[in-house]
Every structure is written in C-alpha cells, then in structure tokens.
Image (cartoon, grey):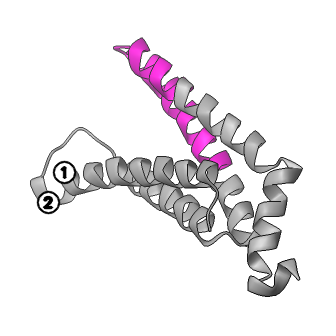
Amino acid sequence: MIPWPIALLTALYAALATCSFAGVWRLLVVGQTGRDLAWSLAWTGLSGAAMLGLALMKPWGRRLAVWTSALLMASALCAAWFAVARPAPQPRWSFVATGLAAVQMVVIRYLTRPRVKRWFVVSSAGPLANN
C-alpha cells in the first residue's frame, strides 16, 4: 500500500506531466508557436519518471524521484532566469517558476528523510518482510 504523502507527491508529478504534455500536444498537433519543444519534452519526461518511481515504491524509484526533482528544480530556476532576462521581462512567470523550484526542494528534503527511506525499503522486500 502506498502511504498517502507519497500518493500526493505522485499526483503532483502526474499533474506536472499532464500539463507539460499538453504543451507538447499544442506544439506538435495544434501547431502553436512561441514555445520551445525541448523544455516541454524535458518536463514531461522528468515528471513522468518521478511519478513512475514514486508509484512503484522501490528504493531505486525513490532515488529516481530525488534526481528528477533536482533536475526539475534546476530547470525551473533556469526558466525563472529566462523569464527575467528577456528583452521584455515577465516577473510574474519568474515568481511562478521560483515557487515551483521551492516545491521541488521541499520534495527532495522530504524524500531524503530516514522514515520515508524506510517506506521504500520495506515495500521492496515483499509481503514477507514483516515476518
């Protein structure tokens, strides 16, 4: 059984993957311009990998979620910098991206707690682990 905090984190990453895939869809199918396909694909892949790693409750899945969260945090900070460094700066988007980076940092801190690590070790041992 997946603990509810891990289920909420999985839902967060599912929402991120859905939103970023919607951006990919708009670029490829609808033909909307003005966005970068690489950013949307990267966010879709990273958030999908974190979602998968958390849902499987394996030790490697937790490590995958920590690493993808770190990469998402770095890309969110890059997006915040790009939003401000443009010829026409957009500080609102910079605050949104910085807030998302802060959420990723909280997720990393949470997933590296010893109690949370034990959840992933116990769940990977199978049903006879408690005997």
State yes or no: residue 127 in magenta.
Answer: no
Q: Which residue is mark 1?
A: 26
Front residue (pair 42, 120): 120
Task: Count neighbours of disc 1 (C-alpha within 10 A) and say few if under 14, some if 14 to 19, many if 20 or more.
Answer: some
The disc placed on residue 104 is none
What whole-number distance in Å separates the C-alpha atoms at marks 2 and 1?
A: 6 Å
- Residue 123 in sight in this render: yes
Residue 29, numbered circle: 2
Quarter occupied by residue 98: top right
Q: In the image, residue 61 lies at what x, y percent?
A: 68, 68
- Callout 1 secondary element: helix
Name the quarter where the N terminus is drawn. Answer: bottom right
Q: Which residues are magenta?
A: 69-98
Amino acid bearing label 2 = Val
Q: From the viewer's perspective, is 103 left or right of 128?
A: left
**128 or 30, which is in the foreground?**
128
The residue lying toward the viewer, choosing from 3 and 89, is 3
In the rendered structure, the answer to whether residue 93 lies left or right of residue 107 reads left
